[in-house]
Amino acid sequence: MQEDFLHYIWKHKKFNQTDLNTSDNESVVVISNGEHNLNAGPDFFNARLRIGEQLWAGNVEIHIKSSDWFLHNHEIDKAYDNVILHVVWEHDAEVFRKDNSVIPTLELKDYILPLALTNYNTLFNSNTNWINCEKDFSEVDDFTISNWLERLYFERLERKSEDVLQLLKQSKNNWEAVLFKMLAKSFGLKVNGEAFLSLANSFDFSILRKSQSKQETLEALLFGQSGLLEVSIEDPYHKSLQNDYQFLKQKFKLDNTLVVAPSFFRLRPNNFPTIRLSQLANVYHTHQNLFSKVIEAESIEDIYNIFSVTTSEFWKTHYTFLKASKSSKKAISKAFIDLLIINTLIPVKFSYAKFKGQFVEEAILELIMQLPSEKNSVVDKFNSLKNVSKSAMQSQALIQLKNEYCDKNKCLQCAIGSKLLNR
């Protein structure tokens, strides 16, 4: 039995409300259940009850056992002085107010509607290994799932915006610097994300600004700070980058001792850090005010146009400094730009709007709904239960659902779980 289930039962009145009696056999009439409090303090505020002949207005506290009151130290917390009813599954101890009067207790287990308890046991006592509602997920109607996934997507965006705004604080309110750091991490993908972020954090964004006019200078900055120029190689381009980096290092007093070395291991050549850093350098060489252009972009095509860049000439015939390869135009693919939109550009646009007090939810939805659903184990498993992910909005929402609700057994706060409990 979960305490959250009792919250659910009380909030949605899933109990027999006729002939309710306290543990002292006083009648209870519920006029208003109160407002559910999800923060610290009593569980329900401003309830209105008739207990015996007395009309009460105040708070309701809910526990599995009455003795949990003392386990949680409510007897010494002033926030609980106005509790008018203690709702429990099992009454095993009397609870007193400061004036030594007994707080009335309602033992709920004898009043819960049998179907609600059956649905609860079905949901939480299933023998599945993935999610609690695995066997019943397909029964939930499309409207409920669609609305819930949209809400979950913005819940995920809100969480990401907290990280963005923290990064903004660290960057002294420089939105261009925030975008650069987030893009750097995204260009590194999963393998080199933290390495590229440490690279972006290793110098002030103003240094990149001063190096933007020449792509080779930008590459010298990024390759040098990442440690990719430390080995001596008999190649004119490599030597030129080394010379440029030594000049930048002395001029700006650069230090890369805290930069994590990027990895080539188990990466496809197009994702080698050399290729991704060259592309990132070209993005900033091409667009002097990238943040403004990202914020002003209103369509997916606008964003594709901004990020449709290639590497510098050297990397068209190389994947590493050591060996030449067949010539190929290593442009940023649309699939990669889609990842940038999902993981960086939309979170930045959403966070900036939130920072400015603007509402851009409809514009954000219009963007994300144009992108195809991501393919990963979580999304694939949900789709095997019911085909619910048709765009990147839904796939992002499903990740939020799995990580923040299913894995944490928060079915009672989930619209899908609630729907199944109400069958």
Image: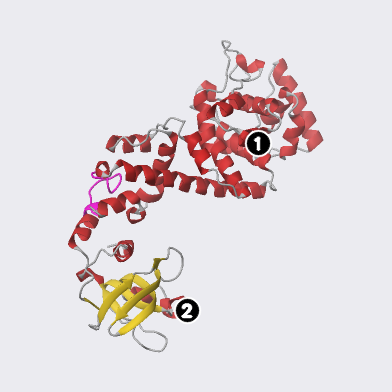
Residue 342 visible in image: yes
The spot of residue 41 in percent (x, y) is 44, 70
Q: Earlier in the sequence, mark 2 or mark 1?
A: 2
How packed mark 2 is, by other alpha carbons closer than 10 Å (few <14, some 14-19, many 20 or more), is: few
Q: CA distance from mark 2 to mark 1?
A: 49 Å
Q: Which residue is mark 1?
A: 291
Q: Please, is residue 363 above or below residue 407 in the view? A: above
- Magenta stretch, residue numbers: 122-136
- Residue 244: within the magenta? no
The spot of residue 411 in percent (x, y) is 33, 53
Q: Which residue is mark 2?
A: 78
Q: Is there a contact, CB below 8 Å, between mark 2 and mark 1?
A: no
Query: What's the magenta bit mostly, secondary-structure-wise?
Result: loop
Q: Please, is residue 81 above or below residue 237 in the view? A: below
Considering depth in this image, is 381 or 352 the residue closer to the camera?
352
Residue 273 visible in image: no
In the image, what residue type sits under mark 2? Lys
What is the number of callouts on the image? 2
Task: Say the numbered circle drawn on residue 372.
Answer: none
Position of 59 compared to 347: left or right? left
Residue that appears at 75% across and 38% down? 206
Q: Please, is residue 101 above or below residue 238 in the view? A: below
- Single out the residue that lies furthest toward the top: 326
In the image, what residue type sits under mark 1? Phe
